[in-house]
Image (cartoon, rainbow, N blue to C red):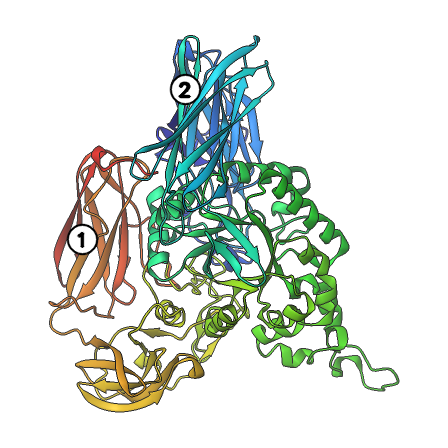
Amino acid sequence: MSRSSFNSGWQFREKSNPFAEMGRAAIPYQDVTLPHDAMIARVRDPGLERGAWTAYYPGGVYEYRASFILPEDAVGKRVVFEFDGVYRDAVIHVNGDYAGQRPSGYARFLIDASELVRAGRNEIHVEARNHQDGRWYTGAGIYRDVWLHVLEPVHLAVDGVRVRTPDIEPELAVVEAEITVDNDSAAVRTVEVRTEIADPGGRVVGSSHAVVTVLPGEPAVSRLAHYVGDPELWNVDTPHLYTLVTELYDDGGPIESRSTRFGIRRLQLNPVSGLRINGETVKLRGACVHHDNGVIGAATVARADERRVEILKQAGFNAIRSSHNPLSTAMLDACDRLGMLVLDEAFDMWTTGKTEFGAALHFVEWWERDLESMVARDFNHPSVILYSIGNEIPETGTPRGGVWGRRLAEKVRSLDDTRFVTNAINGLLAVMPDIVEMMQPQPRPGSTESADTVTAPPAGGDGPGVNTLMSDLGDMMNAIGSSENVTRRTAESFGVLDVAGMNYLDGRYETDRELFPNRIILGTETFPTRIDRYWDLVLRHGHVIGDFTWTGWDYLGEAGIGRVRYPDDEEPGEALSGAYPWLVAACGDIDITGWRRPASFYREIVYGLRADPYIAVRRPGRYGQRVETGPWAWSDAVASWSWGETEGRPVVVEVYSDADEVELLINDRSVGRRPVGPAHRFRTAFDTLHEEGTVTAVAYRGGAETGRWSLRSATGPVLLRAVADRPVIRADDSDLAYVELSLVDGEGTPFVEDREVSVAVAGPGVLQGMGSGDPATEESFASATHRTFDGRAVAVVRPTGAGRIGVAVTAAGCPPVEVVVEATAEAGRRG
């Protein structure tokens, strides 16, 4: 088999209407390299209906085209295009003829063009569209990788190598390879399958072979057993990867060869020990993530996804939930290599739509094919341990929803019985019709009061009134979710699962231990501000296997749900969303540039992964102002002691620690001691005066110091610093260089002040995107000039060939700087 990247040589434009353009010049195409986001460079629309959902980016229809040369000897072979994701409603033509389509914007799909291609030059054309179909920033176009397969008449199926490890002992592991061979010829063919396994160090540790007779048009499956001695097991801390090489031979010699990465690991699950990997209990420290890559939009360039996994793991997470669609192949590869567990989620909608033109329109016709595609692609990834069949599906509170849940769960099990099945159920949404009815004003029987003066009764008659519930969204969701009504209505939907996925239902964790003693629970989506409470529940209960925060990484769209509101300054708007120019959700532990926010370090402390305390300072300019925060919002604090002209002004210093108490020192002078630790939710705050110099937090346990951490004021002239994440990158379309830009003093201490920064790229590279963590900005990521936010920004450079890439950076009042990155083929391919 010949499998090659098909990311180069594409052109793109907004869709041209040939009838409307008669007599006018056609819209020109632009050269692009895939993956490509057609939406990210569009002008945002402040008047867009429900614009906060999509970060005020308008939808559109786009078309791509690419030419390719097919040699004479390829005619008659199977020619297949593999698309890892096209958003959305993709329609594909080859040489002007219809070749296929896919409604889902996230499904991997194959297009068989064998009957449409010819020797010589060919053209493939792809249409993609989005229009009021996403609840977040979706991006648009061919935003994930494309591969071209040219297959011999007898060949390994595209997804024809599946590896299982059914029996693992310390001395020996059984590795079973399920090999599917296709025969597109008209004759019966007998071939030989040979396999070889190499350990993580490249040493051959097992081999097998089998003769396979393949009838025309009837796939043949061969199962080859291998016995690997002293196996090196895959886990989050030891992500050892083996390689299976599968070769196909006939009398004329080798036909094709394929390499497959896999891990040897055993998954177990019970309500006492919870989730076990290789016999050891693992609690999931989970991050929900959306699929966009911040300043480069939805483009899934492999390095962007790899970098996200690296930073998430450094921040203490050991698991990712793909909210609310399958991850890219590139991110799964990174999770395999780096040791990150994956909850692989399939759908955000079933038969009930959440948007006007959402995925529910196509669900009934396409759900089986979408599940088959997800499992076939992801089967060999050891990082994948759970499949989720849905997210906050309203139908889960109905009998028909129970039927659909069972149908989906059993379909997944028929495709892969080596993982567990969950569903991220929201109790409030499951009984939403009852809630709507409950909230309608109703006069009491026999009352003479008008209906609009009477408070509606609580759902199921077993909770507080609506007015009380609405005062705190988290408490409201827990109160409703813990009700008998939800218990009864969701029993069937939870009952079809291996793991009960619960969104904002921590109130059920302890009670369900008695109500449903065999129920194993996972917090599939939770408020970031309550991680201390959630993690205590996870640690104390074996049947609660982990927590996934909303969100680990910030994302475009659902703009402003995590914002800190200053009502005296803010225009009235939606209760949850931010008005234009709000851009990001602002609820991530890590911002869209990859910078860890204070909430990330707080979480690390709660997880027990950080001994030193952490300091974050609320913005002095906001001192004393009225402030409001929602359940996804952290405080508006920054880890900085550089606040300009604030000497002697009041300031609030937050300190996070798991110790008994912390002492705050300003220039080595004690401001006081305060209790902290679990009993005080791992945090405290000092109301003091700002004084240039150094602020230090000292942690004590049992009277003895256990750690300290300091912030220093930046002094002197403002300097510009540019640092590339790696000095050498691959000279191909899968890599990127992230150049972090910051305003610092001569010792590298950051300033909080902001300036416009400009970037110019020289050599074999282009600026893929540039931006900051500013949650509400009108600047375009396509611009080479951006204003820093809290003194920071990032520029993303994509190589166009091998050689020296120079990135020159300038800012007003700062000496210019340059960073050099070498792009080389010798850096090696990913995977």
Q: Position of residue 531 (x, y in %)?
A: 47, 71
Circle 2: residue type: Glu
Classed neighbour count for the residue bearing mark 1: other residues with Cα under 10 Å, few (<14), some (14–19), many (≥20): many
Comparing 403 with 31, the one in front is 403
Q: Is residue 571 visible?
A: no
Instruction: Name the amino acid type tagged 1.
Output: Val
Of marks 1 and 2, the one in the foreground = 2
In this picture, is 463 found above or below 170?
below
Residue in front for this viewpoint, 417 or 778 = 417
Work out whether residue 302 can be spotted.
yes
Mark 1 or 2 closer to N-term? 2
Does dot 1 land on a helix, a strand or a loop? strand
Residue 305 pos. (x, y %): 37, 47
CA separation, marks 1 and 2? Answer: 48 Å
Q: Residue 454 vs residue 736: left or right?
A: right
Q: Which residue is mark 2?
A: 256
Query: Which picture quadrant has residue 397?
Result: bottom right
**Residue for badge 1:** 809
In percent of width and height, residue 46 lies at: 47, 58
Question: Residue 287: percent from the left, percent from the top?
Answer: 45, 59
Quadrant position of residue 440: bottom right
Front position in the image: 493 or 266: 266
